[in-house]
Image (cartoon, helix red, strand yellow):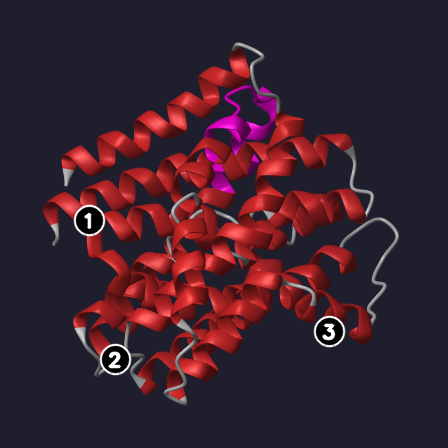
Amino acid sequence: MNQEFLYIIILIALGYILKKLNILQEKDGETISKLIFKITLPALVIVTFDSVKIDTSLILLPVIVLVYGIVNAIVGPLVFKNEDRELKGAFLMLASGFNVGLFAFPLVYAIWGMGGLSYFSMFDVGTSLIVFGIAYILGSYFSEEGLKLNPLEILKRLASSIPLMAYLISSILNLAHIKLPDAVIDVASLISGANIPLSLLLLGIYLNFNFDKQFIRPMLKFLAYRYSLGLIFGLTLYFVLPFNEMFRYTVLIGLLLPAAASALTFAVEFNYSDTAKRLVATISNITILVSIVILYVFANFVL
């Protein structure tokens, strides 16, 4: 297990080094990100759901994530009530979603293989609904321009999310016991092989260790809130839910994953200040490092 984690760290470090050497730049990350979310990740989803049997209990995973998102939408504004309006919006967007496709999949595959991916894929369905629903609404509401809620726009975003559509269609096909042609699976398998290395390189490209000292206090407050809420919620469900161990591991670990990368995209869309955008980017990077440590400890000392 340590060897798999070493390979993961090496690939992330390689992406960071390539950026520092100007061989790759952050703008290149946008192209890589599009390749992942529009091609390699959907291909991985297709292969995963074709090769495993989905227990009907997995349908509960997106529901759990949605409930967590609602709880966060209620508790978060109370925790950050004394922060500036824009800062509050940034924190709530960061706290609402999880980085599953880019961050979790490589690590989950290293620990549990394809079987583990099926669980985290269902978890990511709920994450997608939170990101394009709850996080989007909260970010818009706390922007300087105020809420511009357009239900049709939110539905359009959900429908245009290729990974989400891949999750939903593949889940339906699996539950209906409908198999895709072997040629489709073979091509998807070939493409999906690029998902893990591309995802890890992308994480390295976007890593940034520079941040303003003024961010220290709000960052510590946010990290304490995000991980304590996730840990309390996750541990409670781990001991209460009557499902298998993999299901409960998915809930516990999933709620401790890094912040969704979409928070920065939304901050730009809602015209957040440069200070708020830098804070969002910095916290996203820190949550990646924290979650790597959590998964390493879990893989080596819990399993």
Nearest the eye: 299 or 239: 299
Residue at 39% x, 60% y is 186
* Label 2 – label 3 distance at C-alpha: 31 Å
* Residue type for callout 2: Leu
The x, y position of residue 31, in whole percent, is 64, 37
The residue to which callout 2 is attached is 241
Q: How far apart are labels 1 and 2 at the CA level?
A: 20 Å
What range is drawn magenta here? 203-221
Q: In which quarter of the image is the N terminus?
A: top left
Q: Residue at x 26, y 72 (%)?
A: 247
Relative to 240, is 202 on the left or the right? right
Q: Observer-nearest residue: 175 or 224?
A: 175
Category of crowding for the residue at label 2, using alpha-carbon neighbours closer than 10 angstroms: few (below 14), some (14–19), many (at least 20): few
Say if mark 2 contacts mark 3, CB within 8 Å. Answer: no
In the depicted structure, whether residue 266 falls above or below residue 24: below
Q: Do the residues labelled 1 and 2 touch (CB within 8 Å)?
A: no
Spot occupied by residue 179 in the image (x, y as percentages of width and height): 39, 80
